[in-house]
Amino acid sequence: IGSLVVMEHGKLVGMLTFREVLKAVDANKGATGDLRVKEMMTRAEVIGPDAEVDDLRRVMLEKHTRYMPVVEDGAVIGVLSFHDVAKAVLEEQAFENRMLKGYISDSVA
């Protein structure tokens, strides 16, 4: 698990990733006793389920975030990772390559 969605009273209030935990532990010189989640978490950027992958990728790059909650009607319905986005882009490119190869081989024949 690379990230946790932080909820308060049923509402999304932030994200907690392994990176934030490491930063907080380092800032406290290894002590974790008094640390609270709200002190470590970051405000979550969110995206809707109908967003295009290119928009998601752009927002993730602009905000330097590796995880993005997907929210619909105020409810968290999932979390996408940068790995998910990269995989989708590669699959789309592979599909386009197959289509182009098919078109070229049909044109040559």
Image (cartoon, rainbow, N blue to C red):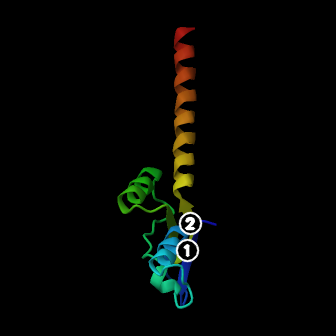
Q: Which residue is mark 1?
A: 76
Extreme residue in the right direction: 1
**Tag count:** 2
Secondary structure beneath label 1: strand
The quadrant holding residue 45 is bottom left
Quarter of the image holding residue 3?
A: bottom right
In this view of the protein, which residue sits in the foreground, 21 or 30?
A: 30
Question: Is 64 left or right of 102, judged from the image as shown?
Answer: left
Observer-nearest residue: 60 or 70? 60
Q: Give neighbour class at mark 1: few <14, some 14-19, many 20+ (Cα, 10 Å).
A: some
Establish if 56 lies above or below 108: below
Residue 9 to residue 83: above or below: below
Foreground mark, 1 or 2, reads 2
Q: Amino acid at mark 2?
A: Val
**Mark 1: amino acid:** Val
- Tell me which residue sits at (48%, 85%) in the image: 38
Tell which of 83 and 49 is nearer to you.
83
Q: Secondary structure at mark 2?
A: strand
Where is residue 25 drawn, in percent x and y?
Answer: 51, 77
Which x, y percent locates residue 99?
55, 28
Q: Look at mark 2 in the image and give the residue it sits on.
A: 79
Answer above or below: position of 11 versus 91: below
Q: Could you say where residue 11 lies in the image, as x and y percent from the top left? A: 51, 84
Q: Where's the C terminus, which quadrant?
A: top right
Residue that appears at 51% across and 55% down: 82
- Name the quarter where the N terminus is drawn: bottom right
Binning the other alpha carbons within 10 Å of mark 2 as few (below 14), some (14 to 19) or many (20 upward) gives some
Tell me if label 1 and label 2 are in contact, CB under 8 Å.
yes
Query: Disc 1 to disc 2, how far (Cα)?
Result: 8 Å
Q: Residue at x 49, y 65 (%)?
A: 68
Whether residue 74 is visible, yes or no, is: no
